[in-house]
Amino acid sequence: MKIKITLLLFLITSICIAQKEITISGKVIDAEEKFPLEYATISFIKKTDNTVVTGGITDFDGMFKIEVPVGTYDVKIEYLSYKTKTYYDKLLDKSMDLGTVSLSLNLEALDTVEIIAERTTADIKLDKKIYTIGKDLTVQGGTVSDVLDNVPSVSVD
């Protein structure tokens, strides 16, 4: 009986040690201006099946601290309009600091920006309300009575 209990305790201890999580920390900054990048994304991707195991974001100072299970991962660091930096086959077996990671701007991705503005259907002034029905799809091809039925606070007999 004592042997079974000892064996069971050894097995439970081994499982607990195998499930140990480590802490990975670091800082993400802009490569040129050296300012911290707030809300940059850090992902830990399992090498065997390309799934994201865990991840996190940087704080106001560009710092991150993420709990990760022991293993080999691709560490991907991303930020909007910056080039993604990936560390391939990174063995994470103890808590470590990745140091300062510099991301450079991805100027190729920013090609053209198109801004489209439309007027609202209701324009409220001090003394009147103006309703623009030009692009109202519910009344296209309808009569004046149909248009007035869709205008708030107007009733047609």
Image (spheres, rainbow, N blue to C red):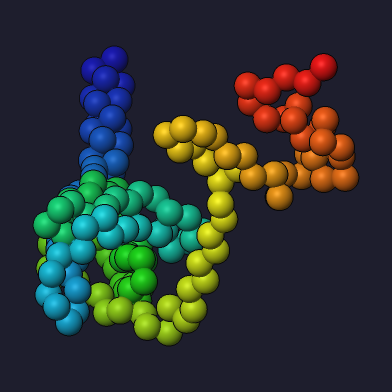
Q: Which quadrant of the figure contains the C terminus?
A: top right
Instruction: Tell me if 150 is positioned left or right of 75 in this view.
Output: right
Task: From the top left corner, tell me how far across and down residue 88 is, in percent.
Answer: 35, 73
Q: Which residue does the image show at 74% across and 30% down from the upper left?
A: 148
Q: Which residue does the image show at 50% across and 67% down from the upper left?
A: 115
Residue 98 visible (yes or no): no
**Looking at the image, which is closer to me, 24 or 142?**
142
Q: Which residue does the image show at 64% across and 45% down from the upper left?
A: 132
Instruction: Tell me if 5 is positioned left or right of 119 in this view.
Output: left
Q: Quadrant of residue 95?
A: bottom left
**Looking at the image, which is closer to me, 127 or 86?**
127
**Looking at the image, which is closer to me, 108 or 3?**
108
Q: Is residue 134 above or below residue 122?
A: below
**Looking at the image, which is closer to me, 150 or 93?**
150
Q: How many marks can you see?
A: 0
Q: Which quadrant of the figure contains the N terminus?
A: top left
Q: Is residue 152 above or below residue 26?
A: above
Q: Is residue 142 above or below residue 25?
A: above
Task: From the top left corner, tell me how far across and down residue 107 is, in percent.
Answer: 37, 83
Question: Going by the picture, which residue comes out furthest to the bottom?
Answer: 108
Task: From the top left corner, tell me how far across and down residue 127 is, in percent.
Answer: 46, 32
Q: Which residue does the image show at 43% across and 63% down from the upper left?
A: 47
Residue 107 visible (yes or no): yes
